[in-house]
Image: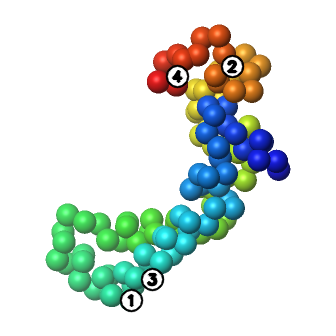
Amino acid sequence: MKPADLIGYCGVYCGTCARWYENPALRQLATALAELVDAHRFHYWIPEVVKEFNYVEFRKALDFFSQENTWLFCQKGCKGGDGRPDCEIRDCCKSRGLDLCFDCEEFPCDKVK
């Protein structure tokens, strides 16, 4: 995939997104935080001491974000079908045959504000 293919309809460069599969930062940070809270044995005392914090769900989230193969990570960019399935900007550009939102005569509109 060429770098130009990673420019979304909205103009965002997908290659720098935390969801881009070649960008390991999110996975690495979630893994490191999971290892840290496990090493400090937070699972023994947080649930009892901090009632308003759901430690179990927090830990599940860290495990989720640590995974490599999950729906969360994009491999094709939004023009290839990844990204938010309900993206108004993508739908609008596709219906108008536009490659980029700012090529539209109506730019800027309420969809991009």
* Vertical order, 11 against 39 (above or below): above
| Side (left or right) of 43 relative to 29 | left
Tell me if I can see residue 82 in this picture: no
Q: Nearer the viewer, mark 3 or mark 2?
A: 2
* Vertical order, 40 against 48 (above or below): below
Residue under label 2: 103
* Vertical order, 45 against 1 (above or below): below
Q: Tell me how many marks there are.
A: 4
* Vertical order, 92 against 10 (above or below): above
| Side (left or right) of 79 relative to 65 | right
**Circle 3 SS class:** helix
Residue under label 1: 39
Q: Residue 50 versus residue 97: which sits nearer the camera?
A: 97
Residue appearing at x 65%, y 10% in the figure: 105
User: Marks 2 and 1, Cα distance to the nearest angstrom?
Assistant: 52 Å
User: Marks 3 and 4, Cα distance to the nearest angstrom?
Assistant: 40 Å
**Circle 2 SS class:** helix
What kind of residue is marked 4? Lys
How is this picture coloured?
A: rainbow
Comes first in the chain, label 2 or label 1: 1
User: Marks 1 and 3, Cα distance to the nearest angstrom?
Assistant: 6 Å
Comes first in the chain, label 3 or label 4: 3
What kind of residue is marked 3? Glu
User: Marks 3 and 2, Cα distance to the nearest angstrom?
Assistant: 46 Å
| Spot occupied by residue 42 in the image (x, y as percentages of width and height) | 30, 82
Q: Nearer the viewer, mark 2 or mark 1?
A: 2
Residue under label 4: 111
Comes first in the chain, label 1 or label 4: 1
What kind of residue is marked 1? Ala
Whether residues under marks 4 and 2 lie with C-beta atoms below 8 angstroms apart, the answer is no
| Spot occupied by residue 2 in the image (x, y as percentages of width and height) | 82, 48
Comes first in the chain, label 4 or label 2: 2
